[in-house]
Amino acid sequence: MRVMPAQGTAHPTVLLRHERPDGSVHVDWLIGRDPAGQEPLVSFRIDDRVDNMTPGTMLPAVRIADHRARYLDYEGPIDADRGSVRRLARGSASVIGDPDSSAWAIDVHWLSASQKLALERIDGDRWQIRVVE
């Protein structure tokens, strides 16, 4: 288990629009495990953008396999005919707790806004993201 540093250390984060070959679309939210963004990225599949959420709202999420660090900057086709990605937002995140546990918090600073988020595992890979403020 890799524990992320305490609050105050900024880690890169991005939202990617992932269009699949079948035409379906979702958002991948990727969060760096280290400040340089070199380790595999904590990854969630969501139906909408986190950066547009307002206080008190919730968004279901599915924890997916950690992504390679290259996706912090990459836009374009994905290997093995898995569609393509386009960056929607970039920011920095201060994680409070361990993302491998069942509940943790994160302060995110996007270019357009800042958010305090709480993430809670519902069951298995299913999570809930809630905007605290």
Image (spheres, rainbow, N blue to C red):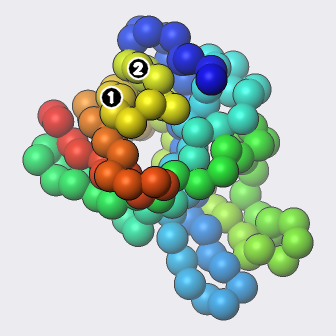
Q: At which x and y percent is residue 16? A: 57, 57
Q: Amino acid at mark 1?
A: Ala
* Residue 51 seen anywhere in this rendered image of the structure: no
Residue 97 shows which numbered tag?
Answer: 2
The quadrant of the rendering that contains the N terminus is top right
Residue 19 shows which numbered tag?
Answer: none
Q: Amino acid at mark 2?
A: Gly
Q: Residues within 10 Å of mark 1 (few under 14, many from 20)?
A: many
* Residue 118 seen anywhere in this rendered image of the structure: yes
Q: Where is 8 relative to 108, above or below? A: above
Residue bearing the label numbered 1:
105
Label 2 SS: loop
Q: At which x and y percent is residue 124? A: 46, 54
Residue at the image position 66 percent from the left and 90 percent from the top: 22
Q: Along the polypeptide, which appears first: circle 2 or circle 1? A: 2
Residue at the image position 21 percent from the left and 42 percent from the top: 131
Residue at the image position 33 percent from the left and 40 percent from the top: 119
The quadrant of the rendering that contains the C terminus is top left
Left or right of residue 74, residue 2 in this image: left
Q: Where is 18 relative to 92, above or below? A: below
Q: At which x and y percent is residue 48? A: 38, 65
Quarter of the image for residue 123 reads bottom left
